[in-house]
């Protein structure tokens, strides 16, 4: 199959995953109606945020974790038609085969890199891995490794830091075994004991924390009675978002990053504790295609910046962005609610106004 056809085929099956600690990739397996990803992507969370090309952000339950094989299975979104991707046969792979690694590196939506299998059965910590030279970057973790028949033959798992495109994928036979192990226990929080391989569930766990087979301490992906809260400025930011009616769990996009929508505008909030600043950037519409309207638009933006206090309109490549910056020591819940509320309100206003008055175009979404 042509690599471009493979990329097009997988676009709607690739899932972006976010937690308070980072981002990663997953992919939908229709045969089992589950999203597959790495255990280290979900990172002890029983609930994560997912998004795809055909659906907006949603919360997804983590049903299965497997620390030894670095696998996790998530609940698929309801009432969304996702394409079927087939699981291939690892035994048929050989060194030199061309493969495509698909994922969301560094939080970017949908990236595919082509390479070859350097070694089909590299042994690490008692497991076989597919060593590939296709680039796997942070955020690619949990995405599929696909052969030229368009079949999943591995789960992209890790890289060796400092290595030149030295990536490793868990072979699909381990994935198939885990899916078959979990299927009879659908709907139960489950974890596979990393010591003996026994499937521990809410029904058989010993004293709520031990494997009933070998006694190893394990942890089920169960939603805690009380959610662990952020601290410092991050906690204040989340309190502000809650006050403004935003779903904080859905807003989280990794460490000290949040994203919300207000009308047609998308607002990204970033806290950098190293330089003590909190930035809110509302991505509005894009520059008009009619060149005669660009100069009047620039004049308008400059005039608005002179008039406004605490907000700045700017052009970032083709995007028009409305920004607000605060010093973390100055941030309180009250003044934050006022500042963010104004940013959200003005973002929605300017997005509509600039499209109507200056012919600005709809922002391109990945």
Image: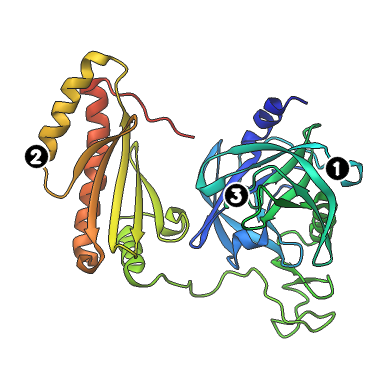
In front: mark 2 or mark 1? 1
The residue positioned 49% from the left and 35% from the top of the image is 366
How far apart are the two marked residues, 1 and 3, measured between alpha carbons? 22 Å
- Per the rendering, the mark at residue 137 is 3
How far apart are the two marked residues, 2 and 1, measured between alpha carbons? 63 Å
Q: Using a 10 Å C-alpha cutoff, classify the residue at mark 3 as few (fewer than 14 neighbours), some (14 to 19) or many (20 or more).
A: some
Q: Label 1 near label 2: C-beta < 8 Å?
A: no
> First in sequence: mark 2 or mark 1?
1
The residue positioned 52% from the left and 58% from the top of the image is 22
Q: Secondary structure at mark 1?
A: loop
The residue positioned 57% from the left and 52% from the top of the image is 138
Residue 29 visible, this orientation: no
Q: Disc 2 marks which residue?
A: 306
Q: Nearer the viewer, residue 139 or 37?
A: 139
The residue positioned 57% from the left and 69% from the top of the image is 223
Q: Disc 1 marks which residue?
A: 95
Q: Using a 10 Å C-alpha cutoff, classify the residue at mark 1 as few (fewer than 14 neighbours), some (14 to 19) or many (20 or more).
A: some
Residue 85 lies in what quarter of the image? top right
Q: Position of residue 118 (x, y in %)?
A: 79, 45
Q: Nearer the viewer, residue 250 or 114?
A: 114
């Amino acid at each position: 199959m042509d690599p471009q056809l493979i990329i097009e085929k997988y676009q709607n099956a690739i899932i972006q995953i976010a937690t308070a600690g980072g981002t990663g990739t997953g992919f939908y397996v229709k045969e089992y109606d589950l999203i597959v990803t790495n255990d280290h992507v979900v990172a002890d969370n029983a609930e994560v945020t997912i998004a795809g090309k055909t659906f907006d952000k949603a919360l997804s339950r983590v049903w299965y974790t497997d620390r030894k094989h670095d696998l996790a299975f998530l609940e698929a979104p309801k009432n969304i038609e996702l394409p079927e991707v087939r699981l291939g046969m690892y035994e048929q792979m050989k060194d030199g085969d061309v493969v495509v690694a698909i994922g969301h590196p560094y939080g970017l939506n949908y990236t595919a890199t082509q390479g070859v299998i350097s070694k089909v059965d590299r042994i690490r910590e008692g497991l076989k891995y597919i060593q590939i030279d296709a680039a796997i970057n942070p955020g690619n973790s949990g995405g599929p490794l696909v052969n030229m028949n368009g079949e999943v033959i591995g789960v992209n798992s890790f890289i060796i830091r400092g290595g030149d495109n030295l990536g490793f994928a868990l072979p699909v036979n381990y994935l198939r075994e885990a899916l078959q192990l979990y299927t009879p226990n659908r709907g139960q929080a489950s974890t596979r004991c990393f010591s003996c391989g026994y499937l521990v569930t809410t029904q058989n766990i010993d004293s709520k924390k031990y494997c009933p087979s070998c006694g190893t301490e394990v942890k089920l992906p169960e939603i805690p009675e009380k959610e662990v809260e952020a601290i410092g400025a991050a906690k204040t930011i989340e309190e502000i978002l809650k006050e403004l009616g935003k779903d904080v769990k859905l807003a989280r996009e990794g460490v000290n990053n949040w994203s919300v929508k207000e009308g047609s505008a998308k607002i990204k909030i970033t806290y950098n504790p190293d330089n003590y600043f909190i930035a809110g950037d509302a991505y509005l519409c894009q520059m008009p295609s009619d060149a005669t309207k660009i100069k009047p638009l620039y004049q308008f933006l400059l005039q608005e910046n002179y008039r406004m206090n605490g907000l700045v309109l700017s052009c970032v490549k083709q995007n028009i962005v409305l920004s607000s910056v605060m010093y973390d020591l100055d941030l309180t819940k009250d003044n934050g609610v006022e500042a963010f509320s104004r940013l959200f309100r003005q973002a929605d206003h300017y997005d509509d106004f600039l499209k109507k008055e200056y012919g600005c175009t709809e922002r391109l979404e990945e």
